[in-house]
Amino acid sequence: MSSTASGRNGTWRNWGGNVAARPAREVTPASVEELSAAIRRAAEDGLKVKAVGSGHSFTSIAATDGVLIRPQLLTGIRSIDREAMTVTVEAGTPLKRLNMALAREGLSLTNMGDIMEQTVSGATSTGTHGTGRDSASIAAQIKGLELVTADGSVLNCSEKENPEVFAAARIGLGALGIVTAITFAVEPIFLLSAREEPMPFDKVLADFDELWAENEHFEFYWFPHTGSTNTKRNNRSAGPEKPVGQVAGWFEDEFLSNGVFQVAQWVGRAAPATIPAIARISSKALSARTYTDIPYKVFTSPRRVRFVEMEYAVAREAVVETLRELKAMVDRSGLRVSFPVEVRTAPADDITLSTASGRDSAYIAVHMAKGTPYQRYFTAAERIFTAHEGRPHWGKVHTRDAEYFAQVYPRFGEFTALRDRLDPDRRFQNDYLRRVLGA
């Protein structure tokens, strides 16, 4: 069970291990036609339908007791258009395979998230993003998509074709149909220089606007129970390539970020009182480093320590105040938090239910190790995020419902009206969608 979710005796589980489902049947279509037939057959049998990618969502967004569609045969690049600078890829293709295939062709996405295990459709449908001053989420780089709707028909969507569906289906939550292919904007491959360095929490907050404005991609990790952060700035570079050396890379990315970190999680779970001390050591273990490489080797890194995560987007101008409140809450709560808090940004985009829809945004992600009780921490954090009209990541833990989303998404009604039109019988519904979109 490497990066994908597993099924035992017909039970499907997600990567974080916090969601399980028992579908009535699983289908692995080898073509769009087979997928359409599977949807029509499910309708005849009165079953709901859900597609599942690699199971990297922490919500039950992909869970179903009906027909579970597995997309692993719908993979690979369909076409590359060098004039339009686009690539069309099958929906079940893992981001890792897409990134590597593009690199071989001398191409790259403009921006990406920090892991690449997910399928392209799973990642985009839930609003997966990295960090960027000018470049937005993976879904915002979509130029066209192919969608199989509830009656089994195929819709091609772009700014010109079915534009109202295109506006919503780029981050469609699996509610509008099943995405079978995606056309991404790409560009000639480029080099990024990464500069990682520790910085005091108070200094990052004081200088946040400058750090954001001066860097194409800025993010930082704050270690709870400490006044320390690790900052990361990625900017385009003329070269030369200077990858992380193999030994240093193994030490920083495998030994510290995965190996020692995993041991720290085990110790922290067995003896929570040790967590603040471990946090202080962890925050000092990472030293400054710079390296230059092709984008996916800079943006992404392996995540082998399993965790559960909540992430909210707040308006970018509210991020400093929100983080101060979060730190004050952790300091006075008696909570023991062994995972760093991750902070990233995104420019406003025009996707109906994007967490950055219509507003420049900053993301604050809180994590807990898999198997540790996370409810108290997440509940307290969520109270702070929602006071700032935060929008939760669709694939990460949250307790919000349709009533809340109607308040924080100006175009929420536009999405639900489109869903009424495309899926009147709620073929693609599950408990999660009933909660977040309403019945």
Image (tube, grey):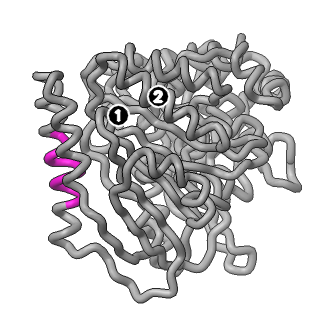
Residue 117 on image: x %, y %: 40, 49
Q: Is residue 154 visible?
A: no
Residue 8 on image: x %, y %: 27, 24
* Closer to the camera in the image, 203 or 96: 203
User: Which circle, 2 or 1, is nearer the viewer?
Assistant: 2
Mark 2, secondary structure of its residue: helix
Say left or right for 210 vs 311: right
* Closer to the camera in the image, 224 or 416: 224
* Closer to the camera in the image, 90 or 164: 164
Could you tell me what secondary structure mostly forms the magenta stretch? Answer: helix
- Amino acid type of disc 1? Trp
How far separated are the C-alphas under marks 2 and 1?
27 Å
> Is 212 above or below relative to 436?
below
Determine contact: label 2, label 1, CB under 8 Å. Answer: no
- Amino acid type of disc 2? Leu
Q: Give the quarter of the image for residue 300.
A: bottom left
Q: Earlier in the sequence, mark 2 or mark 1?
A: 1
Locate the N terminus and report the quarter of the image it occupies.
Answer: top left
Residue 173 on image: x %, y %: 63, 32
Q: Which residues are magenta?
A: 252-262
Q: Is residue 234 visible?
A: yes
Identify residue for label 1.
15
Identify residue for label 2.
326
Mark 1, secondary structure of its residue: loop
Q: Is residue 261 magenta?
A: yes
